[in-house]
Image (cartoon, rainbow, N blue to C red):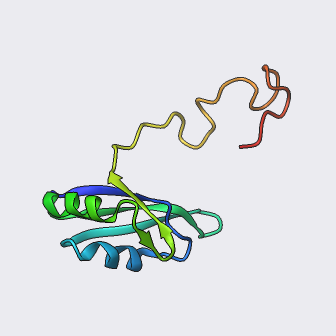
């Protein structure tokens, strides 16, 4: 099946194609995707690469982690499974204080 890698600290100039090119040196890349903001379309500074061969993925982690890509030292590690998120966009799972009441006042902190 292959191994999925997390790539962090990406420069905003890096797109899917540049990410794929950086990892192809180590083996076949099934997919390479830079995560973007839904509203602005701008990179969030991280992405995921799926490599067909586990050995190639391990080598890519060893060789690319901490190395520069387009001027920034990237972080490369094995991707962890995505956690289930509470609520389906309706705001479920948020504690008191988000929309009034609670210990943080009526507006809560801006994150």
95 versus 37 height, above or below: above
Q: Where is residue 17 in the image (x, y as percent from the top left)?
A: 39, 79
Query: 65 left or right of 85?
Result: left
16 versus 2 height, above or below: below
Query: 93 left or right of 109?
Result: left
Q: Looking at the rendering, in which quadrant would you find the C terminus?
A: top right
Q: Position of residue 34 (x, y in %)?
A: 45, 67
Q: Which of 46 and 92 is in front in this view?
A: 46
Q: Where is residue 21 in the image (x, y as percent from the top left)?
A: 32, 79
Residue most extreme to the right: 106
36 versus 93 height, above or below: below
Q: Which of 93 and 50 is in front in this view?
A: 50
Q: Position of residue 102 (x, y in %)?
A: 78, 20
Q: Nearer the viewer, residue 25 or 108?
A: 25
Residue visible at 25% across and 76% down in the picture: 24
Q: Looking at the rendering, in which quadrant would you find the N terminus?
A: bottom left
Residue visible at 76% across and 26% down in the picture: 97
Residue visible at 53% across and 41% down in the picture: 88
- The quadrant where residue 63 appears: bottom left
90 versus 24 height, above or below: above
């Amino acid at each position: 099946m292959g191994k999925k890698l997390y790539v962090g600290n990406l420069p905003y100039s890096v797109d899917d194609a540049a990410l794929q090119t950086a990892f192809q040196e180590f083996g076949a890349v099934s997919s390479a995707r830079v995560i973007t903001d839904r509203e602005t379309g701008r990179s969030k500074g991280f992405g995921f690469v799926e490599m067909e061969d586990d050995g190639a993925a391990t080598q890519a982690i060893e060789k690319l982690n901490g190395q520069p890509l387009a001027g920034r030292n990237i972080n490369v590690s094995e991707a962890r499974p995505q956690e289930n998120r509470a609520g389906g966009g309706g705001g479920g799972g948020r504690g008191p204080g988000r929309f009034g009441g609670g210990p943080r006042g009526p507006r809560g902190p801006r994150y």
